[in-house]
Amino acid sequence: MTDNNYNEIIELLCDRLSSLTDSEVSITAETNLISELSIDSVKLLNLIMEIEDAFDISIPINALADVQTVHELASLISKIKSAS
C-alpha cells in the first residue's frame, strides 16, 4: 500500500465519519468507530456504500467483522483496492 493511497483513504474516511457523527471527537487513524464515534450498523453500511462508490470497489460485509478503528478500515479498503 502506498502512503499516498493510504492517506487519501484516511482523509476520505475522516471527512465522511465527521459528517456521520455528532461527536466532538477528533477523528484520527486510531479512532475507534464504535466506542468513540458510536457508528451503528446503518451508519456503517452507508459509509461502506459511499466508499465503494468513491473507490469503485466492493467490500464484503464479513470483512468488516474485525474492523474497529479508522486505520483498520483504511487498510482493508487499500487492500481491496490494490487487489482489483
Image (cartoon, grey):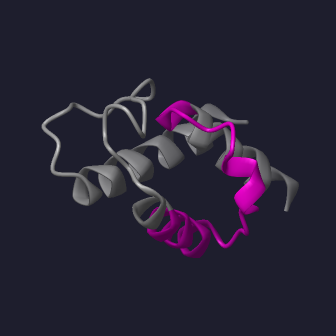
* Residue closest to the eye, 24 or 14: 24
Residue stretch in magenta: 45-71
Relative to 80, say whether 28 is above or below: above
Place of residue 30 in the rendered image (x, y in percent of width and height, measured from the top left)? 44, 23
In the rendered structure, the answer to whether residue 66 lies left or right of residue 38 reads right
Q: How many labels does the image show?
A: 0
Place of residue 10 in the rendered image (x, y in percent of width and height, measured from the top left)? 47, 41
Relative to 65, say whether 48 is above or below: below
In the rendered structure, the answer to whether residue 79 lies left or right of residue 48 reads right
Work out which quarter of the rendered image holds the C terminus and state it: bottom right
Q: Residue at x 48, y 60 (%)?
A: 41
Q: Does the magenta stretch include residue 61?
A: yes
Which quarter of the picture shows residue 76?
top right
Which quarter of the picture shows residue 31?
top left
Work out which quarter of the rendered image holds the N terminus and state it: top right
* Residue closest to the eye, 57 or 40: 40
Q: Does the magenta stretch include residue 62?
A: yes
Which quarter of the picture shows residue 51?
bottom right
Relative to 84, say whether 66 is above or below: above
In the rendered structure, the answer to whether residue 79 lies left or right of residue 7 reads right
Q: Residue at x 50, y 32 (%)?
A: 69
Relative to 33, say whether 31 is above or below: above
